[in-house]
Image (cartoon, rainbow, N blue to C red):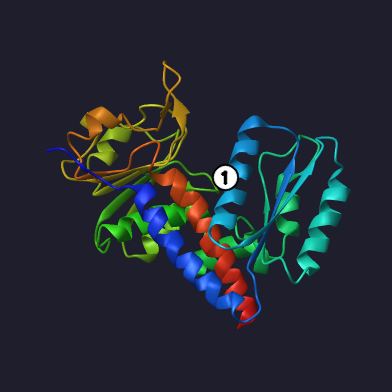
Amino acid sequence: MTAQLIDGNALSKQLRGEVTRRASALKARGITPGLAVILVGDNPASQIYVRNKVKACEDSGLHSVLEKYDAALSEDDLLGRIAALNRDPAIHGILVQLPLPGHIDAQKVIESISPDKDVDGFHVASAGALLVGRPGFWPCTPYGCMKMLESIGYDLKGRHAVVIGRSNIVGKPMALMLLQKNATVTVCHSATPDLSAITRQADVVVAAVGKRNVLTADMVKPGAVVIDVGMNRNDQGKLCGDVDFDGVRQVAGWITPVPGGVGPMTITMLLVNTLEAAERTAG
């Protein structure tokens, strides 16, 4: 068996086409969906992520504002700028690129963003909405994973889904989203004994720990769906995920590649959340 690929690039293109169509409909009503992106400091990876997000907005017909600040920016000044963006009717989504410099409390910054503009889905109000199944903004990466499962017509009801990783950004919200679709969910982490005994029972495995080869072929149930959220570098410096792709592909039924899998979906779901924020404002 050779697993079928879940192509994040192709799915992203399809979803972005829908974003463009809906954005055009809003523009016809005099509303242009707007995203403000704040970058503090000169982290090279953050600069790339921010550039890709801004370009994706422009390509899909959304208005984007990129604000760059020196790493010495004070926490109070950053909070003040966010407060101003919260009041700006032309801005529907606010994204503060993480990580932030050490002297700034990232959680405090996240909580200062209006829940109505929290298109990253990191605010405690967004987390609470997800927990109880109320409307809110889902974190972009797990949201993208759910769209990938949906794209292959996979019915999660009654399936056993295993999430490797328990971060607030991916692991925990991923588990809640799977649970909403009536999967039986197990969350594994660094203190989980005998990880392979659990993953071999899984119909779906989501690997999201940022560690190479955390999931290998002998740990996968034949025919399982494997979603690789990781982003690492191999010994040759090439991008790779958390999954031993070449090995697992010979066992799994479906698998996401790295690159070209979850990565482009994360940015696409940011566009979707920003568009939805604008649509809610427009009523």
Q: Quadrant of residue 114?
A: bottom right
Q: Position of residue 264 (x, y in %)?
A: 45, 47
Question: Which residue: 45% across, 44% down?
Answer: 263
**Quadrant showing the C terminus:** bottom right
Q: Is residue 135 visible?
A: no
Give 39 or 161, whichever is nearer the viewer.
Answer: 39
Q: Position of residue 215 (x, y in %)?
A: 32, 32
Question: Dot 1: few (<14), some (14–19), or many (≥20) neighbours within 10 Å?
Answer: few
| Image side of residue 59 versus residue 148, left or right | right
Q: Position of residue 262 (x, y in %)?
A: 41, 45
Give 49 or 138, whichever is nearer the viewer.
Answer: 49
| Image side of residue 15 versus residue 149, left or right | right
Tell me which amino acid carries mark 1.
Asn
Question: Which residue: 44% across, 51% down?
Answer: 265
Instruction: Decide: is 84 above or below 170.
Output: below
Q: Secondary structure at mark 1?
A: helix
Give 137 or 188, whichever is nearer the viewer.
Answer: 137
Q: Quadrant of residue 121?
A: bottom right
Instruction: Decide: is 186 above or below 29.
Output: above
| Image side of residue 169 versus residue 89, left or right | left
Q: Is residue 203 visible?
A: yes
Instruction: Decide: is 251 above or below 92.
Output: above
Q: Residue furthest top?
A: 235
**Quadrant showing the N terminus:** top left
According to the picture, the residue beneath numbered tag 1 turns out to be 52
Give 208 or 33, whichever is nearer the viewer.
Answer: 33
Question: Which residue: 63% across, 80% down?
Answer: 282
Q: Quadrant of residue 208?
A: top left
Tally of numbered tags = 1
Question: Which residue: 66% across, 69% down?
Answer: 116
Q: Position of residue 151 (x, y in %)?
A: 30, 59
